[in-house]
Amino acid sequence: MKRPDRLLSLILPAAALVLSLLALRPWARPAADLEAFSRLPVLQGGRVKPVDTLASSTLLMLSGRTQFAFRGRRISAVEWLLDTLTNPAQADLYPVFVLEDLELRGLLGLEKGGAKRLSFLDLEPHFQELRAQLERAEKVEPAARSRFQSAVLNLGERLSLYNSLKNTVQVAWTKDMPKEIESFLKAVKPGMAALHAHQSGGKSFNRKALDELGGYFERYQSLHQAAYFWPLPPLAGRQEWSSIGQGLLAVFQETHVHPAAPTWAQMSLAWRLSRREEFSEALLRYHAFLGSEAGGSLRWARYERWLNQAQPFYLGMMLYVAGLLCAFASWLAKPEALRGSAFRILVVAFILHTAGLTARMIIQGRPPVTNLYSSAVFVGWVAAGLAVLLEHRGRTNFGNVTAGITGFTSLVVAHHLANQGDTVEMMRAVLDSNFWLTTHVVTITMGYGGMFLASAFAHAAVLRAPFASWQDSTSRNLASMTYGTLCFSLLFSFAGTVLGGIWADQSWGRFWGWDPKENGALLIVLWVALILHARWAGYVRERGLMVMAIFGGVVTSFAWFGVNMLGVGLHSYGFMGKAFTALSAFIAAELLIMAAAVLPNLRQSKA
Amino acid sequence: MKRIEPKKLLASLSSIWFTIACLSLFIVLVLACTLAQAKLGIYESVKIYIRSFFLYADVGPVRIPVFPGGALVGLALLLNLALAQFSRLEMSRRKLGVWLAHLGLVVLFLGEFSTGLFQIETQMFLDEGVATAHSEDLRELELVVVDFGEPDSDVVYALRQRALIAGRPLKHPDLPFSVEVQSFQMRSQGDSEYPVATAEIKVSGSEGDRPLTLSSQENGQTLNYASRAFMLTLRPRRHYLPFQLTLKKFNRKMYPGTDIPSHFSSQIRLADPARNDFRDVLISMNDPLRYGGQAFYQASFGKDDKMSVLQVVRNPGWLMPYISCALVLLGMIIHFAVKLRPALKEPA
């Protein structure tokens, strides 16, 4: 390689990395107090997470975004969360309820082209109508619900989540929480005395004091029940987190409330009255308290918050695209230098992808695949990793192209799957086994990854076909890479499928249940086995292998997503509805490509 | 008419074409079975598409086979595999991987056939503190006559579901009366895989002519015959075990602040006088008890955690998939290593 070329192949990757880092806008950091607040650990959905994760995933569920504009100002998820927790008067104005279903919009009298997102106040006048529709929809079996009914129920769930949030730190519309706690504590002693007097059968007891305490008791019971998350960390020697309600009611067992409950109350009041200095001070005190009482959770939350900020998958996504562009460019000019640059960029992208994956595993304490979101991340990781490896060995540039495409696509798919809330979910009891998750789920997902990579190679070969022969060395090279990847995929799909059966045998006593997910995996195994047998017997050659490999991608996407949509059809709403459309479009496109790949054959054979 | 030459037949049955045809048919069946599950449920779909020799279509009153079923395709593949192995594939080191993988597949197929034929799945309902020595097959019923006449024990006479045919009187030498089934109806119930049944039973020589109506969803009917008390019940068929299990405590844990269960387990006392085996066992998710040729799995719970439900499976072939999995994986690894090594060694 000439010297300027060698320089180019170093400069390009460096430039790509710097540009993507700049795209994270490192200078646009939130205010110091908001930053400190977003690092606080809370318990929600069965795990400890930073407020940051909680705020973004919740806002994402309500509005499909992680921030929004309001009266010309950008409101971040954490700011929105603080307002919702402490200041309903403000929060009710924010347009955070996304309404896309046309029939539901019709019910509320909204124009087709009008605002997509409404505030709580916009929705309030329609509550009576909504409630009536909700009652009707609830009576219908889930499978039989119309799109409209699912949309109504979905909106109902979001409104109830929003209501939970308002009643987490304090009963909604509380004016002065610290004062309320004070008067509650004052009421405890006389109230308890009255209770004891009453219980011991005495007729003369202070009824007013007793009623007052009873009122508080009920108030905090319902606060506990409504709470969306539990912010109070376990005190030394304990295990359980508690809600604000529980923290206040602790006074009855331990003679004092949870020490962090008043601090939350102070933060709440200070934020509502926009006294940012007081808010910061309360936060500082709380951080100090956490440092001494719950240092572990604090560090944990800080780590996850850091990860949220670093966005390794987002960075990786941009670098995969950059690598892909470089790889394309290398076919136009400076093949050696640009191919090398592309390879280096993709290696960095893959390292970031790996880092993100590892960080998630550490947070969850689980193998990499636990839900649909993480499976997408992992499928891309396997495919891109294999492609990078093959590029390292073969230097055909096709490894670069396929690494870029599979890595980027899978991360985009994962990004869209993240809309359903926090992507680090807890596992149900049936799945609570790291050993089987690792052996079965991870193995089978590796099979998916291999299959998609094979399909990507096949796409490259088919797109190349009009300009080149199926028999030239590049074609044969592609065919052998596809073949190798298919072998990889068969090995892992089969192992994963059978190990799934063995897991089922271990857990509930039947080796093979023929359930949709198992069948999906079996379809992949059968299809790859069919391809390989056809190839071994010589019934198909390069072109046939490629067309069949593309269909392998279709089979895999069905096994991966399609079986989750059984019975979903066109009536579904929201995420599954969109996913169904996307999957159908993908399959249709693939079938067209396959047809196009077969056509030239007819022309040639006539000639 | 052309005579079919055995040699040619053998050649086509052992050909890769036949393999590919079988694989394609199997793919179609698995896909159909998967899609049908949305409407029919797993049990019915598997019965129609997989555990059958043919798929039928009703043409008027006649049922004609229109497509091979899973069992037939499975057998064909097995035959193809066996024939190909001995007629085409040479026995060489190069083919060792293929041999192993195919052998593993044979074991897998045989295992699935044995499961279809021999596996018995029942459920055991354990109430806290109550010693239980039977499990129930919810898919099959039995008609039971209980004789309360003996002083220290009740005598139970059970008739299997297949004996309950209208119009045929059933008599046991120790029973003073015979019973005759006048009608027996079974229907599936909503989404549940398990059927419910009603039967009208006529007891010979009983006072009055009114038959007793029994339902599998209700308790039985009592009957006084010759001043002895009897009870007739229609209930899930019981399988008796030669030992007893007693639920000591059912444990359930949730993730804090959610209603997602994180762990179930049952503490159980096992009492087997025949083998002089008395001990405590813990059955939890992913951790069954294997005892007396059966496996007991944590399946469900109820009655405010005072009851635990175990799935009881007797499957003599349960080890076959394990053996098969090991063989196929080993075979594939060897074969792909042999095949791919030259490709990987190719200079860049």
Image (tube, grey):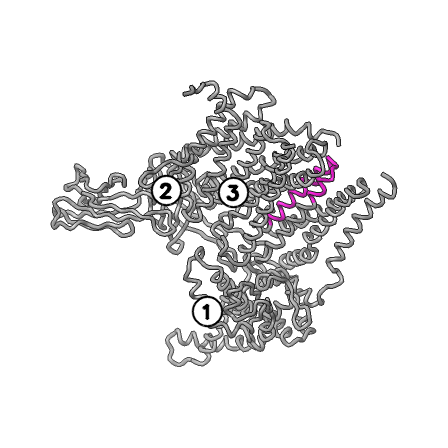
Residue A438 percent coordinates (x, y): 57, 42
Mark earlier in primary sequence (1, 3): 1
Q: Amino acid at mark 3?
A: Gly
Few, some or many residues within 10 Å of mark 3 (<14, 14–19, 20+):
many
SS of the residue under disc 2:
strand
Disc 1 is attached to a residue of which chain? A
Quarter of the figure with residue B340: top right
| The C terminus of chain B sits in image quarter | top right
Query: Mark 1: which secondary structure?
Result: helix
Please report the bounds of the magenta region as a residue range: A374-403
Give neighbour class at mark 2: few <14, some 14-19, many 20+ (Cα, 10 Å). many
The residue marked by circle 2 belongs to what chain?
Answer: B
Contact between labelled residues 2 and 1, with CB atoms less than 8 Å apart: no
Q: Amino acid at mark 2?
A: Thr
Please, what is the three-letter code of the amino acid marked with disc 1? Arg
Residue of label 1? A131
Decide which of B64, A509 is in the foreground and name it: B64
Q: Disc 3: which chain? A: A
**x and y percentages locating residue B100 in the rendered image:** 54, 26
Which residue is nearer to you in this view: B43 or A170?
A: B43
Q: What secondary structure is the stretch in magenta mostly built from?
A: helix
Residue for badge 3 = A520
Q: For this view, does A31 lie left or right of residue A61?
A: right
Residue B122, label in figure: 2
